[in-house]
Amino acid sequence: MPSRCFPSPDPAVPSRTPLEPPAPDLLTDRTAARPKPPGARGTPVATAAPEPPPPVPGPPTVHSPSAPWASSVTPLTALALIASLALLALCTWQIAAHGPLRTYDERLGRTIAGSPLPSPVAEFLADLGNTAVAVPVLALVAGWAAWRARRAGTPRWWLPPLAAAVAMAAVPALIVPFKALVGRPGPPGPLAGETGFFPSGHAATAAVAYGAAALLLRPHLRRRLRRPLLAAVAVLNLAVAVGLVRRGYHWPLDAVASWCLSGPLLWTALRLSRLSRPSPAAADGDRTAEPTEAPRRRDDATPGDGTAERRDDANATTTATEPRRR
């Protein structure tokens, strides 16, 4: 069987291949496609992601007036207040019932009265508990603290001085009935033979006046000066008590009972003064309740603020620099 013969391809005839258009000359052909700058006409502009909606203010937070009191009474503070009132009750019972504690108290009083402390120094220390000395000091400090707080824009700036004044006014309201109820006779000395020495009015006046003044000064002092100030007030009250006993004006337990009575008064004044400071929760609630302005995007241009004019200038510049088409 004869084999089929296929003509061999002619090497002179080129093979048929699809014709490819010639590449445009990028240097001479102006009709070639050129990349367009961003923002030119016909070119999509990448827009920023949409901003989240502004937070919707919730209902105002209602704070109970008793919250500052409940949050400020720590177990240690409550224990100190209970111990102060318990010691006051114990001293009153022993003095009124002529108990053994009264015997030891009178013995200690005679020992201090015979001490080598100079009488002029003791008299000066005892006079520091007089109302003519202690009350003006408290008034000056209260006025200065009120001026500083009002100048700083503190809300209820008048409350701390008012609390100190109320605590000072409560001293005679509590001491005078106490003296009449117990009727303790005085030690041997210039006031021997009289009654009504328990508790000591001078010791209570010094404790409340100087203690309240220290509490008013404390927020306006540096942190490293606050504890030394409180320690100085404690030493001053101890010196007043020593002067009173040394001069024969009171027994030692008279001053101790006055301190036990002054402690709750100072604590009450401190709590009332702290009510003038907004709590952190209340401040957070106020900030949440305020409407928050949403950040303005580039498209939100207000006429007259220059934003629209700047955007039009930018578009005009881009159009001018765009290559001309034939």
Image (spheres, rainbow, N blue to C red):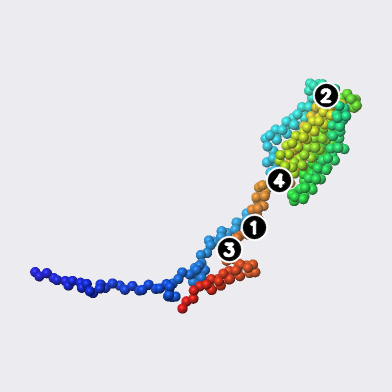
User: Residue 243: x and y, percent?
Assistant: 84, 29
User: Residue 188: x and y, percent?
Assistant: 88, 23
Cα–Cα gap, marks 1 and 2: 68 Å
Question: How many residues crowd mark 2 within 10 Å: few (<14), some (14–19), many (20+)?
Answer: many
Task: Say whether residue 88 is left or right of residue 24.
Answer: right
Q: Earlier in the sequence, mark 2 or mark 4?
A: 4
**Residue in view at x 55 percent, y 71 percent:** 317
Q: Earlier in the sequence, mark 2 or mark 3?
A: 2
Cα–Cα gap, marks 2 and 4: 48 Å
Which numbered disc covers residue 174? none
Q: Give amino acid for label 3.
A: Arg
Q: Earlier in the sequence, mark 1 or mark 2?
A: 2
* Number of on-image labels: 4
Cα–Cα gap, marks 3 and 4: 43 Å
Comparing labels 1 and 3, the label whose residue is closer to the camera: 3
**Residue in view at x 16 percent, y 71 percent:** 6
Q: Please name whichever residue, 71 or 154, is drawn nearer the observer in this view of the structure.
A: 154
Is 260 above or below relative to 15? Answer: above
Which numbered disc covers residue 112? 2
Cα–Cα gap, marks 1 and 4: 26 Å
Return the residue at label 3: 297
Question: How many residues crowd mark 3 within 10 Å: few (<14), some (14–19), many (20+)?
Answer: few
**Residue in view at x 81 percent, y 38 percent:** 209
Return the residue at label 4: 65
Return the residue at label 1: 291
Q: Give amino acid for label 2.
A: Ile
User: Residue 201: x and y, percent?
Assistant: 84, 33
Q: Confirm whether residue 95 shows in the render.
A: yes
Task: Say whether residue 315 is left or right of residue 146.
Answer: left
* Quarter of the picture holding the N terminus: bottom left
Q: Give amino acid for label 4.
A: Pro
Q: Quadrant of residue 67?
A: top right
